């Protein structure tokens, strides 16, 4: 992937190294074929209605990892294409396709330089995926380019709330503000098991970025787990914190029908 930015190369190296451990640790949640869920608490799509009816439309899973979400969306009748920069993750995706019998094309590529023609898709989505590990000032314009007029973009990720509340090293998020909100952009994580560069913007910066790229905001869904929810992502946040504050949210935006492709 020559020409990729330094943070993309760093993040790709992380996922090549950690993919097997990640997939094994979260298999019981990731490999549920009976439901399509979102986020670390696996909030059901049928409860929050992010994607809606996908029957017969062209869908890009933007950072597909092991292809579990893409498989479930394909089960709902979509023509899915997956993109991920990690070969190791895509190999897990191949095994999941073998397991389920659901197949779709996948591309190993840098999400900041999507290798598809303009106006190729009706919907792009990701659950964390590319949007957590690439520069939004590069990714949002690229998604706008590959969507058709009227196309939808939905992505789940960490909130500014949890970025401000996270402590140093292994400290869980607290009710105190530990970091500045203004100036959010990126952070380098250097835990021995998690060495990535991740991205976040303030709410105002997200809104301006969407508008500058021809998107109309349809919704912002702040995920709150039910009291009986369980998760394999126990190092992300606690149930108590996630019930009190939004740890994850889903932006739903639509490319204006009169936007240039």
Image: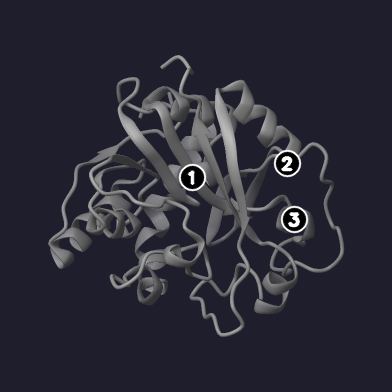
The Cα atoms of the two marked residues, 3 and 2, are separated by 10 Å
**Residue 166 location (% of width, % of height):** 74, 60
Residue at image mark 1: 154
Of 126 and 108, nearer the camera is: 126
List x then y, in percent, for residue 237.
65, 70
Q: Tell which tag, 3 or 1, sits nearer the viewer.
A: 1
Real-space Cα distance between discs 3 and 1?
A: 19 Å
What distance separates the C-alpha of mark 1 from that of mark 2?
16 Å
Of circles 3 and 2, which is in front? 2
Dot 3 or dot 1: first in sequence order is 1
The correct choice, above or below, for 213 with respect to 180 in the image is above
Q: Which residue is mark 3?
A: 161
Quarter location, residue 57: top left
Helix, strand or loop at mark 1: strand
For numbered disc 3, what is the local secondary structure?
Answer: helix
Does residue 149 show up? yes
- Closer to us: 82 or 243: 243
Q: Is residue 140 left or right of residue 206?
A: left
Q: Which mark is residue 11?
A: none
């Amino acid at each position: 992937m020559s020409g990729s930015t330094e943070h993309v190369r760093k993040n790709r190296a992380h996922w090549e190294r950690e993919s097997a451990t990640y997939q094994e640790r979260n298999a019981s949640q990731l490999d549920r074929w009976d439901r399509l869920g979102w986020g670390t608490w696996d909030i059901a799509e049928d409860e929050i209605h992010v994607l809606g009816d996908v029957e017969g439309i062209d869908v890009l899973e933007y950072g597909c990892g092991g292809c579990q979400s893409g498989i479930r969306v394909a089960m709902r009748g979509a023509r899915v294409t997956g993109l991920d920069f990690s070969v190791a993750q895509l190999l897990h995706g191949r095994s999941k396709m073998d397991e389920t019998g659901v197949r779709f094309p996948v591309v190993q590529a840098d999400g900041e330089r999507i290798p598809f023609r303009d106006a190729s898709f009706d919907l792009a989505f990701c659950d964390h995926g590319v949007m957590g590990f690439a520069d939004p000032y590069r990714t949002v314009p690229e998604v706008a380019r590959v969507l058709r007029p009227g196309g939808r973009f939905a992505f789940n990720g960490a909130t500014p709330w949890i970025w401000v509340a996270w402590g140093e090293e292994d400290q869980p998020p607290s009710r105190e503000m530990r970091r500045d909100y203004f100036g959010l952009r990126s952070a380098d994580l250097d835990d021995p098991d998690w060495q990535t560069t991740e991205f976040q913007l303030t709410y105002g910066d997200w809104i301006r970025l969407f508008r500058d790229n021809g998107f109309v905001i349809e919704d912002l869904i702040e995920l709150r787990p039910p009291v009986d929810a369980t998760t394999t992502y126990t190092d992300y946040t606690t149930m108590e914190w996630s019930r009190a504050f939004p740890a994850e949210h889903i932006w739903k935006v639509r490319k204006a029908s009169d936007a240039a492709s």
